[in-house]
Image (tube, helix red, strand yellow):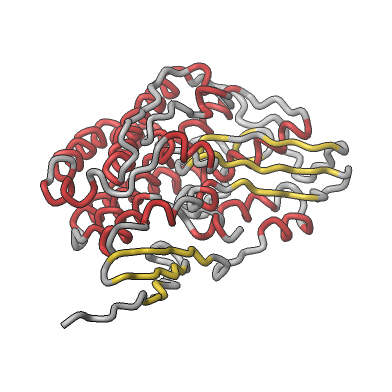
């Protein structure tokens, strides 16, 4: 007896923000096979770009924290760099070094979350995620020492940083830097050769470098598809031109490669932090304490290499204390472009893992 099978469309999400955020997928199945996917966004619309037009330039820093709230430091960094270009402001060396130290600690923390939830989506039932949370907590402790906050930090300022690092920050950072390499090795040993992980991720949802470039995808997803592109190298900002590190690439472009690139990038971030600690010297951390900027009329955009890819704030000034226009280029939004191409032809269980391999944050999507 033959069965008459009809495609079925299922709504997956919107989920609670503690998963991948309030994000919905309309997935059409033929049996268990995915034949169509439509991402639906807009459930967490923050209106950040519009809100920025009603606040002065310093007040907007707090809005940037709420975009990718897993990587607040780099959100701050991208915004203040564009403001400094608009004003024509030079940042003291110590302020730039503190920014890069904070940004690379944030990259490690973001990748830990990305890897932990990726394994959770694969069905690891919490153990790798808790390992990742354990190390991320120590980074958040360091952030708390820098600025009194852990998640929405608002640490950076136009012209530098909010304040210098307290004296007890440096011993705590040294202890963390002494411990974290072995914990990354532990994660590597636990995950990278696990036969279930390999079977579920190798060769699943591959993207070619050409596909990624055509879709403007950046960050670890692009580098996992073999494209050596990192704004810290190609368009250095702050003090990235004074430190040595490798741009990690892998050729396969599959779910496993995206995980492996993030793991390797954490080691490169530690290299950068070590060099910054060795090079930083005493001095001012901020060019000005003026909180009310009135930049000349003009426009500015400075892209940075955020943990998830290219992040930038395009700011148009009309000479007042608030931007005339603020447009955010968020990597999480752009990196969802090829979701359909990644999932069609695979099964639901594969699709959930592929979604996790993108490591996106809906706060940055619905900006």
Q: Quadrant of the C terminus?
A: bottom right
Specify the farthest residue to the left: 195
User: Which is nearer the eye, 9 or 362?
Assistant: 9
On screen, 356 above or below 252? Answer: below
Q: Position of residue 185 (x, y in %)?
A: 19, 35
Specify the farthest residue to the front: 1
Q: Position of residue 344 (x, y in %)?
A: 37, 58
- Residue 94 placement: quadrant: top right
Q: Is residue 81 visible?
A: yes
- Residue 111 placement: quadrant: top left
User: Which is nearer the eye, 209 or 275?
Assistant: 209
Residue at image coords 46%, 32%: 101
Q: Is residue 176 visible?
A: no
Q: Position of residue 167 (x, y in %)?
A: 44, 34
Left or right placement of residue 69 versus residue 154 in this view: left
Left or right placement of residue 6 versus residue 367 in this view: left
On screen, 262 above or below 44? Answer: above
How many discs mark residues in the rendered view? Answer: 0
User: Which is nearer the eye, 47 or 101?
Assistant: 47
Q: Position of residue 76 (x, y in %)?
A: 59, 44
Left or right placement of residue 137 versus residue 290 in this view: left
Q: Quadrant of the N terminus?
A: bottom left
Left or right placement of residue 179 versus residue 228 in this view: left
Residue at image coords 40%, 33%: 223
């Amino acid at each position: 007896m033959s069965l008459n099978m009809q495609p079925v469309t299922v709504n997956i999400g919107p989920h609670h923000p503690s998963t991948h955020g309030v994000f919905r997928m309309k997935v059409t199945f033929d049996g268990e096979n995915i034949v169509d996917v439509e991402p639906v966004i807009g459930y967490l619309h923050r209106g950040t770009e519009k809100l920025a037009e009603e606040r002065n330039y310093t007040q907007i820093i707090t809005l940037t924290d709420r975009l990718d709230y897993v990587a607040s430091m780099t959100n701050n960094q991208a915004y203040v760099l564009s403001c400094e270009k608009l004003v024509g402001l030079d940042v003291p060396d110590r302020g730039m070094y503190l920014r890069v130290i904070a940004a690379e600690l944030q990259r490690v923390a973001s990748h830990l979350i990305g890897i932990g939830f990726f394994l959770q989506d694969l069905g690891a039932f919490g153990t790798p995620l808790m390992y990742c949370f354990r190390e991320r907590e120590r980074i958040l402790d360091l952030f708390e020492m820098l600025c009194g906050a852990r998640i929405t930090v608002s640490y950076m300022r136009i012209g530098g940083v909010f304040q210098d690092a307290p004296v007890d920050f440096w011993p705590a950072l040294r202890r963390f830097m002494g411990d974290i390499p072995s914990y990354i090795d532990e994660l590597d040993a636990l995950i990278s050769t696990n036969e279930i992980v390999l079977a579920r991720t190798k060769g699943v949802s591959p993207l070619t470098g050409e596909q990624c470039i055509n879709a403007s995808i950046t960050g670890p997803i692009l580098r996992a598809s073999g494209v050596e592109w990192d704004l810290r190298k190609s368009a250095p900002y702050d003090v990235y031109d004074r430190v040595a590190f490798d741009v990690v690439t892998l050729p396969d472009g599959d779910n496993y490669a995206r995980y492996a690139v993030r793991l390797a990038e954490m080691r490169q971030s530690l290299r950068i932090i070590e060099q910054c600690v060795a090079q930083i010297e005493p001095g001012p951390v901020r060019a000005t304490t003026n909180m009310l900027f009135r930049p000349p009329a003009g426009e500015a955009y400075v892209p940075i290499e955020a943990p998830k890819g290219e992040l930038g704030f395009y700011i148009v000034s009309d000479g007042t204390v608030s931007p005339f226009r603020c447009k955010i280029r968020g990597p999480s939004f752009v990196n969802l472009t090829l979701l359909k191409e990644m999932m069609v032809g695979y099964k639901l269980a594969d699709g959930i893992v592929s979604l996790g391999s993108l490591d996106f944050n809906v706060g940055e999507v619905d900006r």
